[in-house]
Amino acid sequence: MKEKYKLFNFEAAGVTTWEFDLIDNNFSICDSFKEMIGHPLPDTVAFDQLLEQIHPDDQNLFVRQIKEATTSGSAGLLEIEFRSRYGKPDGDNWIYCKGVTTYDQQNHPNKLSGIALDVTKQVRDRLMLQSSEECFRNLVEHAPVATCLFIGRQMLIEYANKQMISYWGKGRSVIGKPLTEALPEMEGQPFMELIDQVFITGKACESKNMFTVLEFDGIRSEYCFNFTYRPLMNIQGNVYAVIGTAVDVTSQVLAQKELDDVQRQIFASYEQSPVAIAVIRASDLTFMLANSFYGQLVGRYPSQLVGRKLLEALPELDGQGFEQLLEKVALTGETHASKERMATIVRSEKLKTIFIDFTYQLQKDNHQNNASILVTAVDVTEQVLSRNKIQEAEISLRGAVELANLGTWQIDLTTGTREYSTRLKNWYNIDESEIITKERAYACIRLQDRSVLSTAINKATTPGGSGLIDVEYVLDALQCGKERILHAIGRTYFNETGAAIKISGLVQDVTGQRKVQTDLRDQVEQRTQQLATANQELAVINQQLTESNDKLLTSNDNLQQFAFIASHDLQEPLRKIQSFGNLLSKRYSAELGEGLSLLTRMQAASKRMSVLIEDLLVFSRVSSSQDRMQPVSLNAIVNIVLSDLDLLISETGASVITDILPEISGDSIQLTQLFQNLLNNALKFRHPQRPAKSGLIPPLLQAMICYLMLKQQI
């Protein structure tokens, strides 16, 4: 939806748009696209149907480019020129399409959309250009001067007429080769760099009397040429080739060089000067003399300058205005002087920006003709850069001040006037054009803070002190419209006699910070009070717990003593019952008959009671006793319980069925109580009209016994 909205916007702006949906293989095209095709089509057309509208010779190219642009992992870009099947009356109809692929959330291509342009005119112009180039080739071959054509930054030799090939001395085998391969001796010579600059800048380069080394029959010799390099542009306005022409002026230059040698002797004294000095011929701006300091200034040896024109020796100066200044001095005779003029110079094969103070002064010959221009220059780069760094630091500081919402202030201690930044004036409620005096400034400050600020300033401006000010004060709300807490810092500047002349610094509005600090301090005090109250409550609770614990310990001690005494006292009657029972069974067993069985059961119950009393005594000492877990036979436990409940079982007429029970690890007393409670409840809550019958171990108890046995095995 977003892409369609964009396409609608483009279409509304008069741009021809299209969109290829990779899912349903359909193209969406606008009316202007249909006009380019030259055949009526629906708004949405299948890919194959659109392909039929393309010139048969371009259909394979169209399919291949679409496939490459929509393949996963590709750049996803489409750029293609093709012809419509339906040409115009005067020739083929050319269409240029450019698009980009979009992807779904799984990074799969789903759409290809873009724009289309009718480039029929451009293509026809390009074809005409190709025809023109053929004509141009013929013109080059028959040109009256040495002419050649270099293609691309590699400087492939496309054309070279007979005269240029004769200069090179290599034959026509150089055609189609890079210049450095065809003429290896040109490597490192100025021509290569000059041609490359034409490719880069698109500006023609022309020079006279330029020396070069060429190789003939294996022998290298120095020659001098007047040459011109001019750029050739393609339809996009980019330089695609450079055409060069050259004229051999070696003999003329050698004659002039002899004359220059004589003049050089006159200026030999300049070589020892600590100032960069050069002499340039006024007529053609050729270097006649350059001392070592001038060579250092421009990054060349003097020998690389003398005999060459200004822009031949220093091509990087082209467009920087120095050539025009020299021509003006040569024409008018007026001396020109510049301070801290910026220049871009090649030093150590790298462009470097320098700043120079220089003077151009015209020199006349014996006939009062304008003969030469004396150039004196001083490199002031370090001074300029240092000053620029200071200015940049000031700009950065101002930027930081604005970013941090700071105000700036300055007090001239000699006049007493103050300078405030716009922000600080707004804080003080001072008009932009108003002159700020001490009285005006202090009127905005809260009364009790005026002396604080005055004391801080006096201390900072006292000779021998730190010279620093760091103070906070409050602006009066009635005077300034709003109460503000300001934090000011500053530094005092002293003159050579030690007297304070100026104090300046920054001011920050810390009202919000102080409010936050106050709120935090109040919250800390509130939390401290709450914590103290909580600690007091905890102390009371701890005291209550201590008292309760002491009472519990006392109660436990009393309980233990009671259990011990009770168990000890209860043992005595039981022992008498057991003793008398034994006597009865021994002496009157014959007379008792069936009563002997009852007596035996009575003795067993008393023995059981004795064991329970002993266990009560042990239980009372559980805090200090060891674990009572031991192997226990559940069959024995059940038999004891059945014996104890024998009378109840007989009275209720119940029957108890037991199975073979396992032996487990446990407390025999507690297990006995468990089985006794189970049987007792079963007998007590039986159905009144049904005979009591109890399966001794219900399912729940069976599960508990199995759990205990499994746990012990683990």
Image (spheres, rainbow, N blue to C red):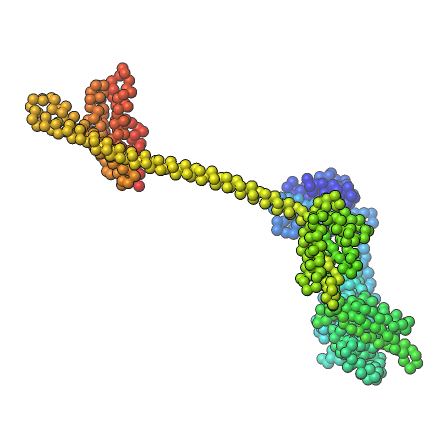
Most distant residue in the top direction: 689
In this view of the protein, can residue 241 be seen by the observer? Answer: no
Q: Nearer the viewer, residue 594 or 552?
A: 552
Q: Position of residue 137 (x, y in %)?
A: 80, 65
Q: Nearer the viewer, residue 29 or 653?
A: 653
Q: Nearer the viewer, residue 166 or 416?
A: 416
Most distant residue in the right direction: 367
**Quadrant of the image for the C terminus?**
top left
In this view of the protein, can residue 68 be seen by the observer? Answer: yes
Answer above or below: position of 134 versus 438.
below
Look at 34% across and 35% down and name the residue there.
552
Horizontal relation, residue 423 to residue 359: left or right: left
Q: Position of residue 59 (x, y in %)?
A: 70, 49
Q: Position of residue 156 (x, y in %)?
A: 73, 67
Q: Position of residue 89 (x, y in %)?
A: 82, 47
Answer above or below: position of 659 versus 396.
above
Q: How many marks?
A: 0
Horizontal relation, residue 684 to residue 378: left or right: left
**Quadrant of the image for the N terminus?**
top right
- Residue 497 sits in quarter: bottom right
Answer above or below: position of 693 versus 290.
above
Look at 29% across and 34% down and name the residue there.
558
Q: Nearer the viewer, residue 471 or 611?
A: 471
Look at 27% across and 21% down and name the residue there.
684
Look at 64% across and 45% down and name the residue there.
515
- Residue 140 sits in quarter: bottom right
